[in-house]
Image: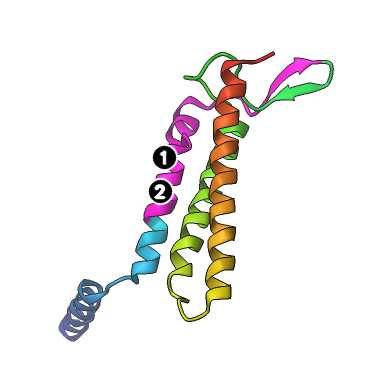
Amino acid sequence: MKRRFSSTSFSLQKASLRLAKYRPSPFLVAAAVMGASIFLLGGGIYDIFMEPLTILPIGGGRFLSYVPYRIHEQLLMGSIGVMILYSLGAVGLLLIYQSTRYIRKPQQVSLLSKVGVALFLISFVAVESLLYWILHFQ
């Protein structure tokens, strides 16, 4: 029995030493931080605690994914949509950053930069137009 406890403590020491020396890749850390930021900025905490409606029926078979005239309230579909748009903008910024690695290939730099800027601008314009629609519902 004593031998079993000593081997268990040795294996626990070995595992804790391995865990203490573990260094996650910078890409993994950056992806986790970016995912957490998008979740927080998109209103994930509000969605979890307030349990909003998924979508707002307005009659005649029409639905809205946002609450008109109320910037401080949100629906689940609107929140998920904003998170997707933020992710699209983040991918655009990552493509712009990635284009700096291919300086010797100007055609690839140009393509990655144009696609990255386009994704970022699409994301920005979509989020701003969503805010405009919320405030100026017709």
What residue sits right under mark 2 in the picture? 36
Q: Viewer-proximal residue, 86 or 40?
A: 86
Kind of residue sitting beneath label 2: Ala
Does residue 131 lie above or below 110 as drawn?
above
Q: Viewer-proximal residue, 48 or 26?
A: 26
- Cβ–Cβ below 8 Å for labels 1 and 2? yes
Can residue 84 be seen by looking at this rendering? no
**Protein image colouring:** rainbow
Q: Regarding mark 1 in the picture, which secondary structure is present there?
A: helix
Where residue 17 sits in the image (x, y, percent)?
A: 19, 77
Which residue is found at the position 53% from the left and 49% from the top? 120
What residue sits right under mark 1 in the picture? 40
Badge 1 local density, few (<14 within 10 Å), some, or many (20+)? Answer: few
Q: Could you tell me which quadrant the N terminus lies in?
A: bottom left
Kind of residue sitting beneath label 1: Leu
Which residue is found at the position 59% from the left and 20% from the top? 134
Does residue 100 lie above or below 120 as drawn?
below
Which residue is found at the position 40% from the left and 46% from the top? 37
Numbered range of the magenta stretch? 33-59
Where residue 84 sits in the image (x, y, percent)?
A: 57, 45
Q: Regarding mark 2 in the picture, which secondary structure is present there?
A: helix
